[in-house]
Image (cartoon, rainbow, N blue to C red):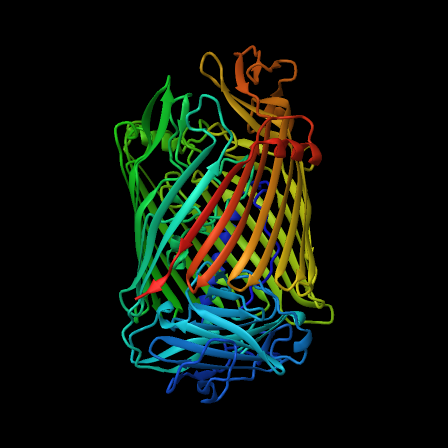
């Protein structure tokens, strides 16, 4: 089904500030009330006014699958095969949107057949305007134009659906659908599908190998079933089994597929070897033996998949290729938090949903980008050196699946190689270890009870490094995490109770543990934190984290959720997971009003109000934020959204990078956005907003328009632009030390300007052959003035927190440093001014010459420049960027998929 379009969220807005301790008590009271409401006896439901006013469970429709008695159909988009004449067609589709409960505007029919190896699906989409309907073609997993699809809950656990879709232009979409409406489009099974036309209708024909699904070994199968249609010009979705907009779970509301019987034991063995040839050109650097101007390499490997049973799968990979991974976006990270990047590697994407576990959407127990990451250490030299970009993965294996009793199983193990940097000093080369050989293990279990009404799970991760004496003082020897989760629904999934709790333990040398305690995640060295303190001589670091969430999540227009999450000071997930910061407690309350009934003015209306606080483990209030947001979908298929935030004055425990907590000014923001009708050949979307402190000293202004165009049915153009002006009067600049060793913390007024643009052009010559160009120049420059020495970090008045350094500071152009002549001790720090210019582009020719088998030709060009210049303008910055020498990579890759 089509994903709901929502306004983008900005992670760059300033953090909030702290109220009184009553915030924690308020959240606890709300949680208690919600839990009490959910545990109270169910009252008799009131009569329904309209189907959309409050969710009600609709009668389950059922479809009878027919076993093939004759030859299977040819998958050609034509329904002239004899097998399609048997049995009755399923029809009577109901609108989900825009007018929930009304019949679909155009009739839709489908039928399901099967044999011992395949499912066969035919969907006939009648259309009175077929002749004028554009047959849009897009890349795989792109929702574009008219679409029909079929989704199987083959586990019949009412939690996960495996979906196969075809656009009217013949493009494939496949995804995993979850109850909350989220989708995982990174799942790429091997299947066949073609579209065609007949008088008054377009046809979609599917052949889906049973090996791509997971199901029980029962002789008689009952699966969940969802068949749907999207009419683009009307922005209309219609369902065979209506999934109400207010549904407490989409997969939970599926209809049923009956008649699948006596399937033979699964024999799923899939093998996909690959070969890659790569040629790179770089700028020559005289005297540097590692920058000779060009380099060639060749690699090969293999991925394999084996069915251990009808519902358990073993995936193996040897020397997996990640050279085809799409480049990560450019950014300038001025925070203390590590940048989070999404996973794009095929091996880790397959079946990843079973390993998804964490405190929330970002603090994760398993972050697959840790496996194969860039080396942890840097060469201890200023001479010429070459360090691998990533750690080589020698092998990886995982077992995923679900038993007939509702037990989900996920086990992943991987081994990465020891990596060495090559160093040349005085003409002599040596090697230095920058990453030890490492073992990673992840195990995940979840048990469904009462068809997913209750879910109980547990998980464990382990990281073990084979440390040598040279690396034992820098890296932890081992890291372990473990925990459990409990999810329960009441009253037809109206209320939810969700608890996640986990613990971590890291072991290593005292030097490695002390370094960990001092890093930006923990900051044990803060002198003003009485509950913290660096423990020298300790060989381990331990902590706990978790979240309690409860409330009304669906059923009706009003929803309310209360939550409390925590991360103790010693909690750490970052060896195999992702954690931004420890030593925090966050209570929150969110109220939502969702109206999905179209009126004369709007098609959908969504209001949310959320209040969030933050405390450390000593009970000190740190921050307080109130956010209001509205998403307004109009009847002409356009949408607008607006959000406002208030961030009270905060106590930031991290901004001084291990120094004392610093009181930061309050701020307020307002962001607006919108998009025109997505069914048109041209579409415009935009985001704009500003954030400023009450005194106006600090402010952020942002404008981000995006233009989409369809010059032809098989050609898609996207042009995006982003302009950001970020002025911060109290921005961290440096930490310096005086001759006596005393620390000095310097803030400054930063004026940062960022300009980025993106051009993407997709030409789909056939559904299997495409040419894509992507180019993204990015420039960002920041200048610091009005330097301030922090003197009283918690002073009530802003001006009392610092002493200006105007006359005491001098700048040296020779070594680009700033020198401060201070009566309490002179000190020096590096000039914090910066410029970042990057251009990343690629041209990709992709040919799926056989189902599951692909050939690529890729040209990638990267340019980078970091020379600071006071003159910031689009023309001057782009001239400097494109004067930089380009690094070019030419790559040819071929993979071949076959099944035994």
Residue 186 position, x and y percent, is 46, 58
Q: Is residue 554 above or below residue 855?
A: below
* Closer to the camera in the image, 814 or 202: 202
- Tell me if 312 is positioned left or right of 51 in this view: left
Q: Is residue 895 visible?
A: yes
Residue 414 position, x and y percent, is 30, 48
Q: Residue furthest toward the right?
A: 600
- Tell me if 88 is positioned left or right of 97 in this view: left
Q: Can residue 695 be seen in this view?
A: no
Residue 263 position, x and y percent, is 31, 78
Number of marks present in the image shown? 0
Q: Determine the residue positioned at 48% across, 31% down.
A: 293
Q: Determine the residue positioned at 54% across, 38% down.
A: 862
Asked which quadrant contains residue 231, the reply is bottom right
- Tell me if 835 is positioned left or right of 856 in this view: right
Residue 425 position, x and y percent, is 37, 19
* Closer to the camera in the image, 331 or 75: 75
Report the quarter where the C terminus lies: bottom left
């Amino acid at each position: 089904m089509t994903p709901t379009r929502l306004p983008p969220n900005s992670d760059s807005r300033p953090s909030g500030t702290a109220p009184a301790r009553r915030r924690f008590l308020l959240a606890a009271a709300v949680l208690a009330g919600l839990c009490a409401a959910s545990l109270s006896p169910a009252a008799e439901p009131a009569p329904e006014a309209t189907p959309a006013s409050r969710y009600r469970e609709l009668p389950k429709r059922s479809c009878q699958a027919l076993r093939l008695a004759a030859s299977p159909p040819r998958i050609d988009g034509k329904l002239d095969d004899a097998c399609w004449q048997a049995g009755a067609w399923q029809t009577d589709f109901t609108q989900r949107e825009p007018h929930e409960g009304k019949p679909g505007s155009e009739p839709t029919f489908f039928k399901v057949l099967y044999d011992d190896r395949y499912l066969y699906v035919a969907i006939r989409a009648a259309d009175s305007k077929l002749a004028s309907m554009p047959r849009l073609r897009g890349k795989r997993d792109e929702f574009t134009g008219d679409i029909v699809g079929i989704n199987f809950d083959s586990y019949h656990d009412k939690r996960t659906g495996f979906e196969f879709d075809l656009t009217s232009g013949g493009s494939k979409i496949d995804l995993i659908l979850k109850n909350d409406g989220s989708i995982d489009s990174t799942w790429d099974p091997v299947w066949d599908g073609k579209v065609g036309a007949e008088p008054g209708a377009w046809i979609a024909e599917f052949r889906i190998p049973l090996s791509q699904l997971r199901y029980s070994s029962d002789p008689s199968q009952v699966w969940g079933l969802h068949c749907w249609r999207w009419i683009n010009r009307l922005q209309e979705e219609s369902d065979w089994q209506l999934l109400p907009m207010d549904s407490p779970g989409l997969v939970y509301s599926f209809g049923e597929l009956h008649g699948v019987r006596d399937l033979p034991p699964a024999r799923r063995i899939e093998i996909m070897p690959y070969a890659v040839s790569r040629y790179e050109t770089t700028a020559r650097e005289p005297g540097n033996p590692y920058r000779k101007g060009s380099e060639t390499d060749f690699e090969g490997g293999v991925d394999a998949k084996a069915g251990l049973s009808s519902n358990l799968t073993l995936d193996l990979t040897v020397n997996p290729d990640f050279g085809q991974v799409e480049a990560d976006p450019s950014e300038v990270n001025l925070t203390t938090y590590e940048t989070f990047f999404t996973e794009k590697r095929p091996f880790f994407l397959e079946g990843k949903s079973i390993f998804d576990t964490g405190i929330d959407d970002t603090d994760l127990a398993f972050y697959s980008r840790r496996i194969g990451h860039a080396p942890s250490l840097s060469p201890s030299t200023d001479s010429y050196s070459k360090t691998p970009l990533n750690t080589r993965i020698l092998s990886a294996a995982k077992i995923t699946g679900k038993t007939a009793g509702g037990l989900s199983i996920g086990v992943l193990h991987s081994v990465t190689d020891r990596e060495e940097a090559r160093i040349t000093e005085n003409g002599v080369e040596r090697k230095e270890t920058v990453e030890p050989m490492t073992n990673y293990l992840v195990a995940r279990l979840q048990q469904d009870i009462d068809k997913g009404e209750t879910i109980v799970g547990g998980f464990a991760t382990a990281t073990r490094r084979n440390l040598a004496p040279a690396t034992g003082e820098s890296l932890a020897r081992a890291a372990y995490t473990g925990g459990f989760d409990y999810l329960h629904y009441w009253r037809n999934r109206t209320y939810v109770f969700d608890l996640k709790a986990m613990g971590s333990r890291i072991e290593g040398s005292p030097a490695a543990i002390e370094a960990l305690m001092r890093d930006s995640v923990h900051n044990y060295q803060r002198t003003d934190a009485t509950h913290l303190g660096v423990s020298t001589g300790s060989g381990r670091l331990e902590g706990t984290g978790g979240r309690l969430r409860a409330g009304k999540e669906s059923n009706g227009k009003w929803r309310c959720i209360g939550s409390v999450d925590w991360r103790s000071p010693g909690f750490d997930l970052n060896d195999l997971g992702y954690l931004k910061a420890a030593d925090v407690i966050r209570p929150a309350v969110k109220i939502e009003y969702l109206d999905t009934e179209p009126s004369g003015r709007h098609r959908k209306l969504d209001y949310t109000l959320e209040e969030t606080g933050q405390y450390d483990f000593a009970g000190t209030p740190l921050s307080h934020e109130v956010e209001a947001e509205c998403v307004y979908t109009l009847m002409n298929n356009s949408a607008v959204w607006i959000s406002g935030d208030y961030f009270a004055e905060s106590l930031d425990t991290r901004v001084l990078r291990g120094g004392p907590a610093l009181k930061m000014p309050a701020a307020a923001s307002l962001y607006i956005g919108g998009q025109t009708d997505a069914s048109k050949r041209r579409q415009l979307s935009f985001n704009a907003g500003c954030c400023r402190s009450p005194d106006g000293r600090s402010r952020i202004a942002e404008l981000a328009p995006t233009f989409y165009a369809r010059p032809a049915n098989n050609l898609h153009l996207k042009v995006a632009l982003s302009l950001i002006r970020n002025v911060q009067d109290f921005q961290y600049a440096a930490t310096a030390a005086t001759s006596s060793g005393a620390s000095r913390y310097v803030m400054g007024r930063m004026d940062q300007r960022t300009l980025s643009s993106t051009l993407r052009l997709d030409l789909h010559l056939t559904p299997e052959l495409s040419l894509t160009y992507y180019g993204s120049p990015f420039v960002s420059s920041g200048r610091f003035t009005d330097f301030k020495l922090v003197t009283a970090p918690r002073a009530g008045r802003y001006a009392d927190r610092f002493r200006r350094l105007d006359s005491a500071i001098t700048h040296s152009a020779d070594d680009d440093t700033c020198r401060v002549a201070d009566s309490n001790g002179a000190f020096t720090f590096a000039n914090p001014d910066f410029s970042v210019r990057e251009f990343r582009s690629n041209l990709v020719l992709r040919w799926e010459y056989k189902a599951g088998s692909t050939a690529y030709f890729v040209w990638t060009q990267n340019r980078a420049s970091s020379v600071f210049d006071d003159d910031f303008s689009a023309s001057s910055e782009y001239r400097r960027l494109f004067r930089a020498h380009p690094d070019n990579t030419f790559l040819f890759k071929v993979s071949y998929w076959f099944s035994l």
